Image: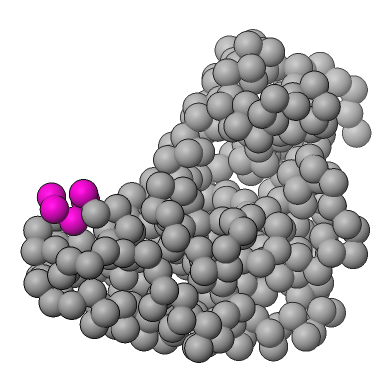
């Protein structure tokens, strides 16, 4: 009944790192061969916390450049920024009226982000899961690539779709299926493998940035926290050494290997040798992306034209859906 279609979004938060690449962008490139894909730079989500306007523009272009430099074809895929397609916010308001307060109160990410200051955060930060549902369902997307920490948002999206369909006695929206990439779902800090890799970490050595030079990548991997033992010879022992296992996970992801094959290649060898091979692998993949990103970012007009064309293509898919929704609800609509 519904076309096999993917929607995924990335926030224009700036300073993209290895976790963004392995956890999302690399997977997007693989998906373009199998699905009709829309890749959205979610600038509306970004302003749930205050953004400096000029910087937001620059960071939006940076994500677009990262998409293209990593191998996403802007002719084959629809690449756009969310705020240019007004149907997202139109459907989000309707979903605000469909979703229940209790559903949103259960969202653990809001609790994590708001912390003890929840009375002073924006209403947008509380209600953004309904906008996220609108981002997906305005295109009647059937699949969304997510990490484990995003599964709750997909469940809410399904709940909203199901309630809308029930309330208006029709199967207007599909029930979204998650695409979870277990091998590259979570990339952890190089200094503390109990935490996700993050640009907000105080230590620059906790993360590899897409903007890093060969020398910086080599140094960061060399200084990555491990232990004094040799490389593990089985997966069970590797999992007990969380910093080492994190590096193994990164090596497997960047080289498209299984963990068992990484163990076979390096078992009982010195970790320094493994770290050098890991740095070489990262350099071979990330440095060309870095160079292409810089080239694209230097041509802002080109990137803006890509986003504008993408928004036009996205709008052509979204307009009939919002028209259908308005008709179901009972709005008088042109």
Q: Position of residue 4 (x, y in %)?
A: 47, 47
Residue at x 27% of width, y 58% of height: 245
Residue 271 belongs to the span the image colors magenta: no
Residue segment shown in magenta: 236-240
Q: Quadrant of the C terminus?
A: top right
Task: Give the quadrant of residue 247.
Answer: bottom left
Q: Using the image, determine if residue 282 lies above or below residue 116.
A: below
Q: How is the image coloured?
A: one colour
Q: Position of residue 80 (x, y in %)?
A: 72, 60
Kindly tell me whether residue 79 is visible in this rendering: yes
Residue at x 40% of width, y 47% of height: 194
Kindly tell me whether residue 327 is visible in this rendering: no
Q: Using the image, determine if residue 72 lies above or below residue 167.
A: below
Residue at x 90% of width, y 58% of height: 53
- Give 91 or 205, whichever is nearer the viewer: 205
Residue at x 42% of width, y 40% of height: 148
Task: Give the quadrant of residue 130.
Answer: top right
Relative placement, left or right, of 125 versus 52 is: left
Q: Position of residue 187 (x, y in %)?
A: 43, 57
Residue situated furthest front in the rendering: 228
**SS majority, magenta:** helix
């Amino acid at each position: 009944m519904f076309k096999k279609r993917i929607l995924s979004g990335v926030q224009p938060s700036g300073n993209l790192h290895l976790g963004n690449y392995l956890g999302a962008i690399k997977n997007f490139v693989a998906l373009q061969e199998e699905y009709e894909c829309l890749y959205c730079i979610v600038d509306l989500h970004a302003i749930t916390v205050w953004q400096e306007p000029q910087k937001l523009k620059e960071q939006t272009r940076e994500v677009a450049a990262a998409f293209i430099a990593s191998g996403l074809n802007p002719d084959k895929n629809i690449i756009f920024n969310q705020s240019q397609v007004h149907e997202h916010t139109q459907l989000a308001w309707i979903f605000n009226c469909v979703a229940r307060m209790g559903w949103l109160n259960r969202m653990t990410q809001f609790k994590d982000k708001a912390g003890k200051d929840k009375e002073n955060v924006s209403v947008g930060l509380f209600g953004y899961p309904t906008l996220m549902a609108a981002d997906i369902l305005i295109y009647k997307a059937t699949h969304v690539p997510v990490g484990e920490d995003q599964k709750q948002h997909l469940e809410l999206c399904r709940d909203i779709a199901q309630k809308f369909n029930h309330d208006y006695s029709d199967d207007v929206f599909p029930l979204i299926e998650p695409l979870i990439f277990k091998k590259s779902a979570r990339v952890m800090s190089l200094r503390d493998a109990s935490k996700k890799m993050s640009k907000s970490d105080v230590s620059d050595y906790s993360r590899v940035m897409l903007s890093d030079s060969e020398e910086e990548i080599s140094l960061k991997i060399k200084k990555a926290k491990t232990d004094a033992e040799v490389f593990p010879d089985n997966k069970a022992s590797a999992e007990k050494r969380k910093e080492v296992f994190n590096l193994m996970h990164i090596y497997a992801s960047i080289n498209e290997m299984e963990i068992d094959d990484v163990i076979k290649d390096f078992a009982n060898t010195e970790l320094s040798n493994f770290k050098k091979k890991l740095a070489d692998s990262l350099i071979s993949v990330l440095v060309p992306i870095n160079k292409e990103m810089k080239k694209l970012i230097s041509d802002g007009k080109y990137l803006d034209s890509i986003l504008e064309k993408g928004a036009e293509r996205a709008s052509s898919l979204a307009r009939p859906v919002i028209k259908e929704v308005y008709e179901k609800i009972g709005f008088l609509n042109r």
